[in-house]
């Protein structure tokens, strides 16, 4: 076991927001926040993360930043590897869409939101467990639909906190290259995307967390920020 203390709530605005409040009040990092429901769950760029009661996994792990953890962008890569490999244990064939989407056959099953507050890292994970939100601008799915319910939500929460904590410890010791390679193994390699109006094909991931892409004219470049959209067709 990791020794991470876990704060559990029936309902929160967001687990990341509660983690921020606790840190601001002076609580030392190294704790996790778990909620059965979120009323204001968030994804990247302020998007709403629909968090129905008892239908998903909504948790946040806090960590003290250090030199190895200074690059917030790569924390999403480490977390994506940890969650993706954990889901593989249960037969979920996850595809990682840069930088932080967890997908199954192009349908979103989860996401990661990493933030920083001073010298503290806040790592939020949301997974559609027993139901998927409908009526969104992208296809969604849930673990129950894909493989049945492999374990209880409570067990899943505990295991996720453990694998996230262990992955961050491993990253501190071993560095980024191994995680970049593991992320690429899980990546959606066969899909094409549009980035800033140009259709691109993923080619790899750098040890800084940049997505390496090839455009239709053969040019290779790196993407460090922004959004990838699904290519038409």
Image (spheres, grey):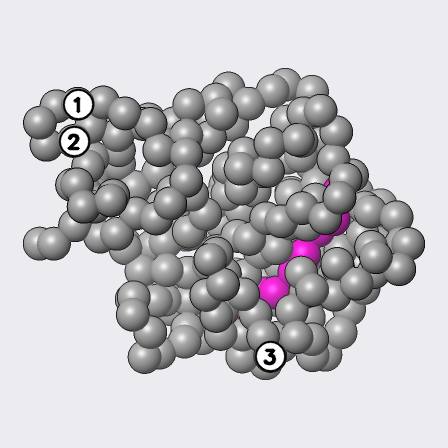
Q: Which residue is mark 3?
A: 39
Q: Classify 197 as above or below 173.
A: below
Q: Earlier in the sequence, mark 3 or mark 1?
A: 3
Q: Classify 198 as above or below 124.
A: above
| Image position, residue 56 (x, y; %) | 55, 70
Is residue 112 a member of the stretch shown in magenta? no
Marks 2 & 1, CB-CB < 8 Å contact: yes
Which label belongs to residue 215? 2
Of residues 80 and 45, which is closer to you in this image? 45
Residue extending farthest right: 26
Where on the picture, by quarter, is residue 64? top right
Marks 3 & 1, CB-CB < 8 Å contact: no
Task: State the separation of the CA atoms marked 2 and 1.
Answer: 5 Å
| Image position, residue 114 (x, y; %) | 59, 48
Seen in the image, is 22 located left or right of residue 20?
A: right
Q: Secondary structure at mark 1?
A: loop
The rendered magenta stretch, by its main secondary structure, is classed as: strand
Q: Which residue is mark 1?
A: 219
Task: State the separation of the CA atoms marked 3 and 1.
Answer: 44 Å
Circle 2 crowding by C-alpha within 10 Å: few under 14, some 14–19, many from 20: some
For marks 3 and 1, give the one nearer the viewer: 1
Q: Which residues are magenta?
A: 55-63
Q: Classify 194 as above or below 27.
A: above
| Image position, residue 218 (x, y; %) | 12, 23
């Amino acid at each position: 076991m990791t020794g991470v203390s876990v704060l559990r709530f029936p309902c929160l605005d967001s687990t990341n927001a509660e983690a921020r409040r606790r840190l601001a009040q002076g609580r030392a990092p190294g704790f996790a926040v778990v909620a059965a429901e979120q009323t204001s769950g968030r994804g990247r760029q302020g998007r709403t993360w629909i968090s129905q009661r008892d239908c998903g996994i909504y948790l946040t792990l806090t960590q003290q930043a250090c030199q190895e953890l200074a690059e917030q962008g790569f924390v999403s890569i480490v977390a994506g590897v940890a969650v993706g490999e954990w889901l593989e244990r249960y037969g979920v064939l996850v595809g990682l869409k840069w930088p932080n989407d967890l997908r199954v056959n192009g349908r979103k099953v989860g996401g990661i939101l990493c933030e920083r507050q001073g010298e503290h890292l806040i790592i939020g994970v949301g997974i559609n467990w027993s139901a998927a939100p409908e009526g969104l601008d992208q296809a969604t799915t849930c673990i129950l639909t894909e493989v049945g319910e492999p374990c209880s939500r409570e067990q899943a929460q505990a295991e996720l906190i453990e694998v996230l904590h262990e992955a961050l410890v491993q990253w501190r010791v071993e560095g980024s290259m191994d995680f970049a390679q593991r992320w690429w193994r899980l990546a959606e390699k066969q899909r094409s995307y549009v980035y800033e109006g140009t259709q691109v094909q993923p080619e790899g991931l750098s040890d800084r967390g940049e997505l390496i892409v090839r455009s239709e004219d053969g040019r290779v470049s790196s993407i460090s920020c922004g959004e990838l959209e699904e290519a038409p067709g």
